[in-house]
Amino acid sequence: MNRCVIRLDLRSTTGDEAVARAGALLSDEKQPDLRLLLLVDEARALKAHQRAYETLTSSGYTDELLCVAVGPIDGNPPRLEVPGSLAQGAGIIWVPDPCGIDWELAAAAPAARRKRSGPETELLRLLDVLSQPEVFHGTLSRVRRTPNLIANPGLRLAGPSGDAGDLQPAMASAAARILAPGRGRAPELPCGEEHGQSRPIRLLSGGPLAVAADEARTAVAEATAVAGELIDGASLFTGAPGAEAVAAGAGRHLKALRARLEDLLSAAHTTTGLTSRQQEAIERAGVVLPGFEEFEPAVARDTISGYLTRGLRAGASLPVLIGGLDEWQERLTPAGSGARLPDLRRACPDELLTRLLHPLPMPEPQRWLPVIGLVTAALATFAPFGPAGGVLMAALWTLLVALTVTRGPGGRLGARAGALVANATAGAAGVVCGTVITIRAIPAPLPPAVWAPLLVAALTLALGAARASWRSRAGAWARDRGLDSAERAVGGLLAVATAAAGDWARAGARAATADAAARMGAALEQVSAVIRNHVSSAQVMPRPDPRIERCLADLVERAMAPRVRALAAGSTAEHAECARVVTTELLAVWHAHASEHGVYAPPPFARERDGEAAALPEEELPELIAAAGADAHATMWQLCAAEDLPLLDLGSAPTAVVRFAPLRDRAALEDLLPAGTVWIRSAQRAGTLRLVPARPGIAYQSRAGEAEQEAGR
């Protein structure tokens, strides 16, 4: 049975208004199938609405008609007047009190009042059950076999409050998960650098940047060579002039190269694509532009489509996927070459330039040098010249120390006067010490075989110590200039330029891809908003069904598919609006399909899945079996008041019942439920509908003339 049940409510209408409402339904092109019609009317108004019933039954559109007559009936004894158009083939469900009572089907059984949640709410629960085509057919066939075609319903329902487990609450439950912030993880998206690894920058030979880079390299190499010569001990005597000037030259050329690159990166800064003026500025600087990357819509479509598919099928929520697209857009949006200006400063810091441009003097003589002066002067006094030899050695030592000062960069004797005085004083002290030792310990002059080696040792020690002091201080001065860093700085500056050239080459493609990501993010936000609004007022099922979740994810994929195909064109607002329209249409298609084929029949947009079987949670099994397999005489919710029970025929046997359970759970329940159970498309409706006939004589067929007079009042 693929037909759906159409409801028509004629309550609170006059006869003419009821006819007009029936005519409007028959002429409504949105309702192509009216073969199963569920009428809702007031019991006291059936006679007055006879012309409306005749309009419906004679239209040729209706095939089966079931009328729910609500409210008490008048008379003493009470009697229900049924128009002939209803009495001839239609079934009547009489509901004196929708709130009803809890009652066991027995003449002496007491009735228990139920918690009253509102007559309309309780009535809707019954109407929801009767709106299931299978229950509708079963109820109509059984009522037609009762006297006077009228029965009072009793219900035993499974599920929360026994009410609708239709598509809307099932969808609301699924939407609560797919719209939950932070649920799941967004799949990885490419960082945006995969298609354009930077090659070394190409500089036009003879161009400004090439010249500046060559000059910087040459100046740094020259400064490094001079520093190497300075460290050589021979330079103490041969000299290494111009070390300061050469280092300063290296600093000036490095600074000039950095300044040129800063100017270029600032002039060519763009977050979209290079303009003609920016390209001219790059060419004037002598940079050979790399080939520009083109935006590839097909690659972007595959990337975003795969991202959405993987994310939705892995259970990631829409807010998570939207956040992933936003982050990707931020990564893709070009920062521009201007953002690399700090990188130039890191590659060639101001502190390095300061050390090269303004070098400090060579470090002062070491504090251990006076000890050498004292020892060498003392040894020289042992020669035949006596104290005169010591004085000469002390003077020589002081001159050697002075030479290490004056030969070094920035060397000024006045600045190192303290060190010179200390060494001269130490030499004088050595003369005194040597003289005292000679007088007291050596009464006779030393033979040449003794004093000659001592004198040679003193000279060697003096020269060696001076040379070692020079090499140590010259090395410290060279290291302090940062010449090793200067060599790396040239390469670092060009590396930044290489990265900037890659930015220029990729800027247009990256910006276009970022725009596409922004458009898709806006479209997905609109899909999310439509789903959220659609289920905002729906009751949420306590346990979401994974099949509805999967179908909802398929809906999102289908709604986004045309947006992804057209991601290269259109504005963000246009994509968002198109996504809204398509999502709304797909939801309508889903509801129409569910009405025709059942809630769990995959809608047309759902992708095919293999081996997807319905799974009934174990904890639901006893409740469903108890409701759908209930004893027809057991306590149920009877939709009448206690004072209405005398109007029911309790002696009729057997009592007519319609048992119903979800079609999706048929495999699990069929062997556990009584034969004749009807299997309905709703996932949560399960139970037993008990039909207790009215006593004979309670209902009678009105005559046409009387009905027409009543309708005209």
Image (cartoon, rainbow, N blue to C red):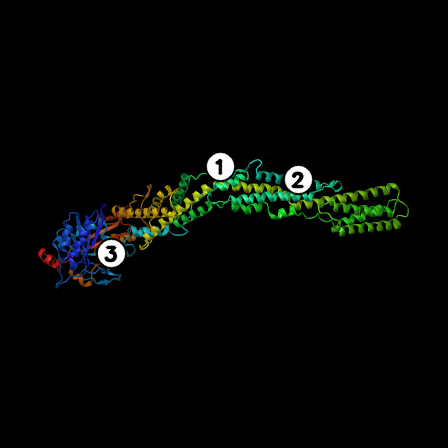
Q: Which of marks 1 and 2 is nearer the N terminus?
A: 2
Outermost residue toward the right?
Answer: 444
Q: What element carries label 3?
A: helix
Residue nearest the viewer, comparing 344 with 369: 344
Q: Name the residue under label 1.
A: 291
User: For numbered disc 1, what is the local secondary structure?
Assistant: loop
Mark 2 burial class by Cα count in 10 Å: few <14, some 14-19, many 20+: some
On the picture, is 540 further left or further right than 396?
A: left
On screen, residue 402 above or below 707:
above
* Inter-mark Cα distance, 3 to 1: 69 Å
In this figure, which residue is indicated by the disc labeled 2?
222
Q: Is mark 2 on a helix, strand or loop?
A: helix
Comes first in the chain, label 3 or label 1: 3
Examine the rendering and report whether any part of residue 372 can be seen.
yes
Residue 447 image point, x, y percent: 89, 42
| Residue 162 appears left or right of 430 | left
Mark 3 burial class by Cα count in 10 Å: few <14, some 14-19, many 20+? some
Q: Name the residue under label 3.
A: 124
Residue 461 lies in what quarter of the image?
A: top right
Residue under the point 86% across and 51% down:
436
